[in-house]
């Protein structure tokens, strides 16, 4: 059944030197019975045993088992060989010390895909460990550990049982008891024992081969070979339970390190989600924020020219009111109302007054709204917060007047002298609404009906101008007649979009027109919103770099912790391999461990992100007119969760692949020569 032919093994000591551990060893083992490999320490006994088990590859030669050369088995075939055909009892037991007796056996059962709890219980009863099945292995005596190692080896009913110095750490009584057990077992399987103790060989007259410095120097062939033993069918079950058990054990053992991984993943995921959702919200909120402004459909049109300053890189900007035809051509037949700018009359002493109150330092801006009566005005929330909030009164419940006073000085071509007229008017108005506007760099603003002020300007006599001309002259007449560069013109027109398409057309013009164009178009809400979005994106560009660094660090931590966990438990991995566990299964233990904590970190990251979004929205609600400015998109969260988990697995995969190539015997070696 088991045949070794011309087995030679040398170990490389240095670049130019090798040590010969076995030299051309050949022997045919019987299909059952107890057989010894004897020799002094360092003679090559353990090396030969490990080669027979498939844990070490020979330099040359072959080992036939049931007609197959195990030195040429594929990785999968070798795993099956260790799982189904052969079992090993190591000199140092190679049990998983921080698991219980039962857990050690459950792991072996799971790896070997055996569903036979009855046999396991019977073996525990037979070898006196039934009452200690819940005891941690590290607390067992040497004899108890050896018996546990024997039970584990017998679970799969192997065809070959390999024992490396099984009595080396036992006293005489325990040694005798173990050998008696091995003799009994040898009736059903081939038992090969490595030892340097000749007492048992002399006592039991078993077969042996003797090694000295890697050479076969003696042997005893059994007088007759036992008959081939028919193996009982083994109940099989699906593999995999041990992966979760080992991962759970590692997770409990590595709580502090894994906590770092979890916190790191959660922190970076929070930053990633907040940055993404804020950027998405900013990009999608422009139209919404602009629509909060009362004058969202009001646009100021001016003509700009640039005059270079001698010996300076700077240019002098000059504004003037454009020609009416230029404005008309600009709107390209869209639905707009073109009006003069009346801002000059609101640039002097402006007050909102009633019998007990007087407000100054606010802006007045024109709007065109068919639903707004001429004497009705609207104030924004900034105006309300500054003037009315402390007064604890409602602006909608009081009667107010808008008091305007502005001197107008110009040179009269009629009399060739300077004329000074004072526009001094107190206009009764009703505040009909307080508009919640986007508060970024906003200012207290009162919005008035452009048509109302136009009528008042037409009706108000510019007294000194009328005397100079000898006929009634209104302030509106003076505005019509003024030059494009006069301050009275405000160097601009106002155009009012009469429908949604025209408004959007004007916003498109604002984006399209550049410094090279002489006509400039502006809207306060559009300008402030664009400024805020540009500033926010600039800030988040810098923050995104920091977030990227945080993600890289987080992924590095995850990969490092996966690597360190596999290093810390590399002997346990080798033990699992010696039981027949596939490299992929062992790899999955650490991947599962990493995935579990990464998933926990991502889950906590989602919770903290949603909490942070709620807090941020609450804080920003007074600026953004909504309590849900930043919106969490479930699909984005799911996508980012999967991506984060995938990246974690990738960075964990690379170092684990390096560990995966490490040889089993390098972790389990005790004495090979």
Image (cartoon, helix red, strand yellow):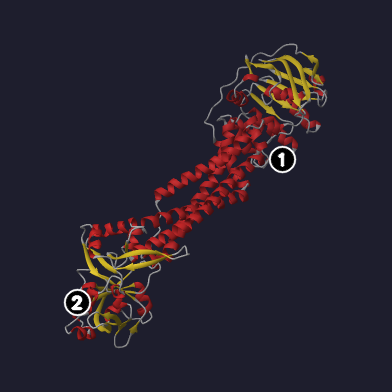
Tag 1 residue = 140
Up/down of 345 relative to 559, above or below:
below
Select label 1 or label 2 by which is in front: 2
* Label placed on residue 455: 2
Residue 66 visible? The answer is no
Residue 204 relative to residue 422: left or right: right
Nearest the camera: 98 or 14? Answer: 14
Residue 281 relative to residue 335: left or right: right
Q: Earlier in the sequence, mark 1 or mark 2?
A: 1
Nearest the camera: 564 or 345? Answer: 345
Instruction: Please tell me how crowded label 2 is: few (under 14), some (14-19), or many (20+) other residues with Cα within 10 Å.
Output: few
Q: Position of residue 665 (x, y in %)?
A: 69, 30
What residue appears at the point 78 percent right and 33 percent down from the top-left corner? 170
Residue 384 relative to residue 150: left or right: left
Q: Position of residue 44 (x, y in %)?
A: 78, 23
Whether the residues at callouts 1 and 2 have beta carbons within 8 Å, the answer is no
Question: SS at mark 2?
Answer: helix
The answer for how far apart the CA atoms under marks 1 and 2 are is 104 Å
Q: Quadrant of residue 652?
A: top right
Instruction: Please tell me how crowded label 1 is: few (under 14), some (14-19), or many (20+) other residues with Cα within 10 Å.
Output: some
Up/down of 640 relative to 472, above or below:
above
What residue appears at the point 20 percent right and 74 percent down from the top-left corner? 373
Assign the N terminus to one quadrant of the image: top right
Q: Position of residue 623 (x, y in %)?
A: 39, 67
Up/down of 212 relative to 576, above or below:
above
Q: Position of residue 364 (x, y in %)?
A: 31, 75
Q: Quadrant of residue 631?
A: bottom left
Question: SS at mark 1?
Answer: loop
Residue 200 visible? The answer is yes
């Amino acid at each position: 059944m088991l045949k070794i032919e011309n087995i030679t093994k040398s170990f490389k000591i240095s670049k130019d030197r090798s040590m010969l551990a076995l030299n051309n060893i050949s022997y045919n083992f019987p299909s059952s019975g107890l057989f010894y490999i004897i020799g002094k320490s360092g003679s090559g006994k353990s090396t030969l045993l490990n080669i027979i088990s498939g844990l070490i590859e020979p330099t040359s030669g072959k080992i036939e088992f049931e007609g197959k050369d195990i030195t040429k088995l594929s990785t999968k075939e070798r795993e099956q060989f260790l799982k189904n055909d052969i079992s090993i009892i190591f000199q140092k037991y190679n049990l998983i010390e921080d698991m219980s007796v039962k857990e050690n056996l459950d792991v072996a059962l799971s790896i070997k895909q055996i569903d036979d709890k009855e046999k396991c219980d019977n073996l525990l009863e037979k070898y006196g460990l039934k009452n200690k099945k819940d005891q941690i292995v590290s607390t067992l005596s040497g004899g108890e550990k050896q018996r546990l190692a024997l039970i584990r080896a017998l679970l799969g009913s192997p065809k070959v049982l390999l024992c490396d110095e099984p009595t080396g750490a036992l006293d005489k009584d325990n040694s005798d008891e173990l050998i008696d057990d091995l003799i009994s077992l040898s009736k059903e399987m081939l038992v090969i024992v490595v030892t340097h103790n000749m007492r048992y060989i002399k006592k039991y007259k078993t077969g042996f081969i003797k090694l000295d410095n890697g050479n076969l120097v003696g042997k005893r062939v059994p007088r007759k070979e036992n008959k081939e033993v028919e193996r009982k069918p083994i109940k099989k079950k699906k593999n995999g339970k041990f992966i979760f058990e080992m991962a759970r054990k590692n997770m409990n053992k590595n709580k502090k390190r894994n906590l770092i991984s979890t916190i790191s993943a959660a922190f970076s995921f929070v930053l990633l989600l907040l940055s993404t959702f804020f950027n998405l919200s900013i990009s999608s909120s422009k139209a919404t924020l602009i629509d909060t402004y009362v004058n969202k459909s009001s646009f100021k049109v001016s003509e700009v020219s640039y005059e270079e300053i001698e010996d300076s890189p700077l240019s002098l900007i000059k504004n003037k009111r454009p020609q009416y035809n230029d404005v008309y051509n600009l709107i390209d037949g869209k639905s707009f109302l073109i009006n003069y700018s009346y801002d000059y009359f609101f640039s002097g002493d402006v007050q909102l007054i009633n019998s007990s109150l007087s407000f100054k330092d606010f802006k007045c801006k024109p709007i065109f709204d068919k639903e707004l009566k001429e004497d009705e005005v609207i104030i924004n929330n900034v105006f309300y917060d500054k003037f009315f909030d402390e007064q604890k009164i409602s602006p909608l419940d009081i009667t107010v007047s808008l008091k305007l006073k502005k001197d107008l000085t110009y040179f009269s071509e009629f009399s060739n002298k300077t004329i000074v007229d004072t526009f001094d008017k107190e206009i009764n108005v009703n505040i009909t609404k307080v508009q919640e506007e986007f508060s970024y760099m906003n200012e207290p603003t009162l919005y008035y009906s452009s048509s109302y002020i136009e009528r008042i300007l037409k009706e108000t006599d510019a007294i000194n101008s009328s005397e100079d001309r000898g006929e009634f002259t209104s302030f509106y007449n003076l505005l019509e007649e003024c030059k494009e560069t006069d301050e009275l013109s405000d160097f601009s027109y106002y155009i009012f979009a009469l429908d949604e398409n025209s408004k959007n057309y004007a916003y498109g013009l604002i984006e399209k027109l550049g410094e090279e164009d002489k006509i400039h178009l502006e809207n306060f809400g559009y300008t402030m919103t664009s400024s805020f979005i540009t500033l926010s994106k600039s800030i988040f560009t810098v923050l995104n770099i920091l977030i990227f660094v945080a993600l890289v660090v987080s992924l590095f931590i995850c990969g490092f912790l996966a690597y360190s966990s596999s290093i810390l438990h590399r002997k346990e991995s080798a033990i699992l391999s010696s039981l027949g566990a596939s490299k992929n299964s062992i790899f999955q233990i650490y991947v599962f461990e990493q995935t579990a904590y990464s998933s926990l970190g991502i889950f906590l990251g989602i919770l903290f992100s949603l909490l942070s979004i709620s807090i941020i929205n609450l804080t920003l609600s007074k600026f953004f007119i909504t309590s849900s400015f930043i919106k969490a998109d479930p699909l984005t969260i799911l996508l980012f969760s999967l991506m984060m988990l995938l990246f974690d697995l990738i960075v964990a995969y690379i170092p684990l692949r390096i560990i995966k190539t490490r040889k089993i015997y390098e972790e389990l070696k005790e004495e090979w020569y």
